[in-house]
């Protein structure tokens, strides 16, 4: 497999011209870029390369600018863990990216389950099912009274987040895995008619003048919005005041955006969002399938309200199958679909220790989330290109499970090569590890623009963040600033776009 083949395949499958692929330059030997048996270097540089190249192609269509895009595999895999390496005023804000209860637990049937408890209501729901207090020892004691499959079903019935630990072989027999067969990691679908997008010959940045409503949370969707902003889009991050913030993730994934809050159960806030929709180009959302239709923001309503829109959707498990409406996160998808088992087997073989083969081993980063986020960027940019060349309204679909399926399709490396030669992720040191410092950028935390907000300058400060791994020869990415919090800005667009 050549380094560029996965990118070439997805590029051509989405109807983009083969000649422009000459502008993409990737590491020739991307694996192992990290100590994993999976081809994560290839995955990272492919997804980030496609997101950058598609932005460059849109720029060429609009403004006639032709430029090259270069991605280094090691930089790309470090960007796939950017949330772990940012600092605020030269300090890390959190020791772990996961809640203290989140993780893998043994079950009565000698299996395992993984629970996700980062959101307070998810933690409360899991503890309610278990009937125990919030300590790891009590959670483990309670889960030893459950079989893994039974607990997974009970959590899903209560709309909580947990998955049973499976091998690839067991996942392949699951109805949801069968429903995903043949599903590509990113789909771009024409869903309505609209005139061709007018050109913007004076656009200095690839996505200059493109307005994005980002209604996503946690990682994959916000990474997508962050990357669109880096290429010049005006990204308005819209969250609900009824949902808890996750500031340790939000700080990194909201850079370059403006942030506002709207309660979509409130008619007044629904109307504010409708006014924003009238002038948006991209509507990015991660509600469960059909979750926004009841509020009047489904794809049919959006195409009628804003012909020519790109409606991009992210789900955990896809649009078909029994799990299509289940909530999920990268770590849960890894656990359910066999990655934890396959990585453990490879690591046990490398260590010549069979006992390690039965202990779930997570991948070294949330690679499914980050890959999904970058593939969303690619799909959105590909759809924007089609609004120029064909016209129309377009839907972009990405699911974590389909992205996992694509990553798996690349196969695994020899364990001795993977773990013996693959460099580990750098330690989270202060001062920054040399490798991290070399690819980091300084950005400012912005003062809220809302006129009713007053804060002290000392509350703002500076962040150090990992630079985007895609280098565009004419329009290097921009970083902007970081919103102070999730309600820092008024719900309106920047004027004179």
Image: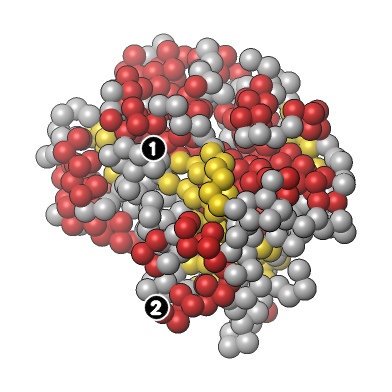
Q: Residue at x 50, y 15 (%)?
A: 415
Q: Residues within 10 Å of mark 1 (few under 14, many from 20)?
A: many
Where, by quadrant of the figure, is residue 15 drawn? top right
Where is 373 relative to 482, above or below?
above
Toward the bottom, the furthest residue is 452
Residue 461 seen in the current view = yes
Seen in the image, is 193 located left or right of residue 160?
right
Query: In the rendered image, which residue does mark 2 sit on?
Result: 266
> Residue 3's spot in the image, x, y percent?
68, 21
Helix, strand or loop at disc 2? Answer: loop
Question: Which quarter of the rendered picture does the N terminus lie within?
Answer: top right
Marks 2 and 1: CB-CB under 8 Å?
no
Toward the left, the furthest residue is 145
**Label 2 – label 1 distance at C-alpha:** 33 Å
Between 397 and 80, which is closer to the camera in this rendering?
397
Q: Residue at x 60, y 60 (%)?
A: 307
Q: Residue at x 57, y 41 (%)?
A: 188
Helix, strand or loop at disc 1? Answer: helix
Residue 442 seen in the current view = no
Q: Residues within 10 Å of mark 2 (few under 14, many from 20)?
A: few
Where, by quadrant of the figure, is residue 2 drawn? top right
Name the mark on residue 163: none
Instruction: Mark 2 or mark 1: name the one nearer the start of the chain.
Output: 2
Name the mark on residue 333: 1
Where is 35 relative to 319, above or below?
above
Between 308 and 365, which is closer to the camera in this rendering?
308
> Residue 36's spot in the image, x, y percent?
52, 25
Where, by quadrant of the figure, is residue 356 drawn? top left
Question: Which quarter of the rendered picture does the C terminus lie within?
Answer: bottom right
> Residue 388's spot in the image, x, y percent?
73, 49
Q: Residue at x 64, y 68 (%)?
A: 279
> Residue 205's spot in the image, x, y percent?
81, 54
């Amino acid at each position: 497999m050549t380094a560029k083949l996965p990118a070439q395949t997805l590029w051509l499958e989405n109807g983009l011209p083969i000649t422009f692929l000459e502008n993409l330059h990737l590491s020739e030997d991307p694996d192992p870029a990290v100590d994993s048996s999976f081809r994560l270097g290839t995955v990272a540089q492919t997804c980030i390369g496609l997101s950058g190249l598609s932005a460059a192609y849109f720029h060429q269509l609009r403004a006639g600018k032709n430029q090259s895009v270069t991605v280094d595999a090691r930089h790309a895999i470090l960007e796939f863990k950017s949330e772990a390496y940012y600092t605020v005023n030269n300090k890390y804000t959190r020791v772990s990216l996961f809640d203290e209860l989140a993780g893998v637990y043994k079950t009565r049937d000698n299996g395992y389950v993984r629970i996700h408890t980062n959101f307070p209501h998810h933690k409360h729901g899991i503890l309610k099912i278990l009937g125990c207090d919030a300590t790891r020892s009590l959670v483990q004691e309670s889960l030893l009274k459950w079989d893994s499959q039974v607990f997974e079903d009970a959590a899903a019935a209560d709309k909580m987040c947990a998955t049973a630990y499976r091998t690839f072989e067991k996942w392949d027999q699951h109805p949801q895995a069968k429903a995903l067969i043949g599903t590509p990691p990113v789909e771009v679908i024409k869903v309505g008619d609209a005139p061709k997008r007018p050109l913007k010959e004076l656009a200095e940045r690839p996505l200059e003048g493109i307005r994005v409503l980002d209604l996503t949370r946690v990682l994959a969707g916000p990474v997508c919005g962050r990357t669109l902003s880096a290429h010049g889009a005006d990204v308005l991050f819209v969250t609900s005041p009824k949902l808890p913030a996750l500031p340790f993730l939000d700080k990194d994934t909201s850079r370059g955006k403006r942030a506002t809050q709207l309660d979509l159960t409130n008619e007044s806030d629904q109307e504010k969002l409708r006014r924003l929709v009238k002038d948006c180009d991209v509507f990015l959302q991660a509600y469960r399938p059909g979750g926004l239709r009841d509020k009047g923001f489904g794809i049919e309503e959006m195409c009628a309200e804003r012909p020519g829109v790109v409606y991009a959707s992210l789900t955990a498990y896809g649009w078909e199958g029994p799990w299509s409406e289940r909530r999920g996160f990268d770590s849960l998808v890894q656990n359910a679909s066999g990655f934890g088992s396959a990585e453990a087997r490879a690591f046990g073989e490398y260590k010549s220790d069979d006992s390690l083969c039965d202990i779930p081993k997570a991948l070294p980063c949330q690679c499914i989330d980050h890959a999904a986020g970058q593939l969303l960027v690619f799909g959105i940019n590909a759809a924007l290109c089609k609004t120029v060349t064909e016209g129309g309204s377009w839907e972009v679909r990405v699911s974590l499970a389909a992205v996992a399926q694509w990553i798996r399709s690349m196969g695994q490396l020899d364990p001795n090569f993977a773990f013996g030669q693959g460099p580990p992720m750098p330690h989270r040191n202060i001062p920054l590890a040399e490798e991290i410092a070399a690819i980091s950028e300084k950005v400012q935390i912005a003062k809220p623009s809302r006129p009713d907000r007053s804060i002290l300058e000392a509350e703002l400060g500076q962040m150090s963040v990992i630079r985007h791994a895609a280098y565009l020869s004419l329009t290097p990415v921009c970083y902007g600033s970081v919103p102070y919090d999730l309600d820092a800005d008024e719900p309106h667009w920047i004027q004179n776009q």
